[in-house]
Image (cartoon, grey):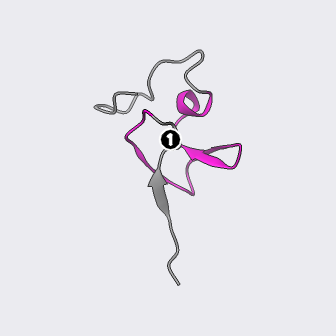
């Protein structure tokens, strides 16, 4: 059996890989930051250099 510990941030335009343990959870999805989790409604980008979201 394989246990997944990391996955791509659920934000469609984000390139970050996020640790499931440390991720921001919203609607059963995992995000790398509050900005991505809220759909960038009030915050630009995720603040991780080079991501581009």
Of all residues shown, which one is farthest toward the bottom?
Answer: 1
Image position, residue 17 (x, y; %): 41, 49
Quadrant of the image occupied by residue 51: top left
Q: Residue at x 43, y 32 (%)?
A: 13
Magenta-colored stretch includes residue 52: no
Instruction: Locate the C terminus by quadrant.
Output: top left
Q: Residues within 10 Å of mark 1 (few under 14, many from 20)?
A: many
Q: Residue at x 55, y 22 (%)?
A: 40
Mark 1 secondary-structure assignment: loop
Magenta residues (range): 13-38
Image position, residue 31 (x, y; %): 55, 42
Counting the numbered discs, the total is: 1
Instruction: Determine whether, in the image, residue 48 is placed left or right of residue 37.
Output: left
Quadrant of the image occupied by residue 49: top left
Q: Is residue 44 above or below residue 10?
A: above
Q: Is residue 32 above or below residue 8?
A: above
According to the picture, the residue beneath numbered tag 1 turns out to be: 32
Image position, residue 16 (x, y; %): 40, 43
Image position, residue 35 (x, y; %): 54, 27
Q: Is residue 52 above or below residue 18?
A: above
In this view, the residue in front, 11 or 47, is 11
Of all residues shown, which one is farthest toward the right?
Answer: 27
Q: Is residue 27 above or below residue 4?
A: above
Magenta-colored stretch includes residue 15: yes
């Amino acid at each position: 059996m394989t246990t997944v510990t990391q996955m791509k941030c659920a934000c469609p335009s984000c390139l970050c890989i996020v640790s499931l343990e440390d991720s921001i959870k919203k609607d059963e999805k995992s995000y790398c930051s509050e900005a991505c989790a809220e759909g960038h409604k009030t915050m630009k980008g995720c603040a991780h250099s080079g991501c581009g979201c």
